Image (tube, helix red, strand yellow):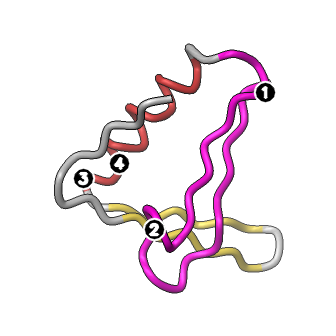
Amino acid sequence: MDMEWIEGFEITVKADGNEVLISANIQGLLSLAKHLVTLAKAEAGSHIHYDEYNSLEDGSVDLIIEKV
C-alpha cells in the first residue's frame, strides 16, 4: 500500500492500561484519514504499522491497524 503523508505531520500514540490515546496535529489527522481510506480499499488481512522509527513521535507505542 502506498501511504501518503501530509508535510508537517505529528502523531503520538500512548497506552495506559486499557486506554489508547492518539494525539495528532491537523496534518497528522489528515494523513491518518487518508491511510484509513487506503486500508479500507485493501484486501482483508492488510495492515498499517506505525512506530516511532517511521511515523510516530519519540516515546510513542506501536500502533497496528488491520482490515478484517
Tell me if residue 51 is in the magenta stretch: yes
- The residue located at (29%, 45%) in the rendering is 5
Q: Which residue is mark 3?
A: 26
CB within 8 Å, label 4 to label 3 = yes
Badge 1 element: loop
Residue beneath label 4, please? 29
> Where does residue 57 sit, x and y in percent of width and height?
42, 75
- Amino acid at the residue labelled 2: Leu
Tag of residue 45: 1
* Sequence-first disc among 2 and 1: 1
Q: Nearer the viewer, residue 29 or 49?
A: 49
Q: What segment carries the magenta color?
A: 43-68
- At 64% from the left and 58% from the top, the residue drawn is 63
Tell me which amino acid carries mark 1. Gly
Q: Amino acid at mark 4?
A: Leu
The earlier-in-sequence mark between 1 and 4 is 4
2 relative to 22, above or below? above
The residues tagged by marks 1 and 3 sit, at their Cα atoms, a distance apart of 28 Å
Q: Is residue 63 magenta?
A: yes
Q: Which badge, 2 or 3, is on the more N-terminal residue? A: 3
Residue 14, position as x, y percentages in the image? 60, 75
Rounded to the nearest whole Å, what is the CA distance between mark 4 and mark 3?
5 Å
Q: CA distance from mark 1 to mark 4?
A: 23 Å
On residue 56, the disc is 2
Q: CA distance from mark 2 to mark 1?
A: 22 Å
Q: Residues within 10 Å of mark 2 (few under 14, many from 20)?
A: many
Horizontally, is 59 left or right of 43 in the view?
A: left
Position above or below: 9 against 44: below
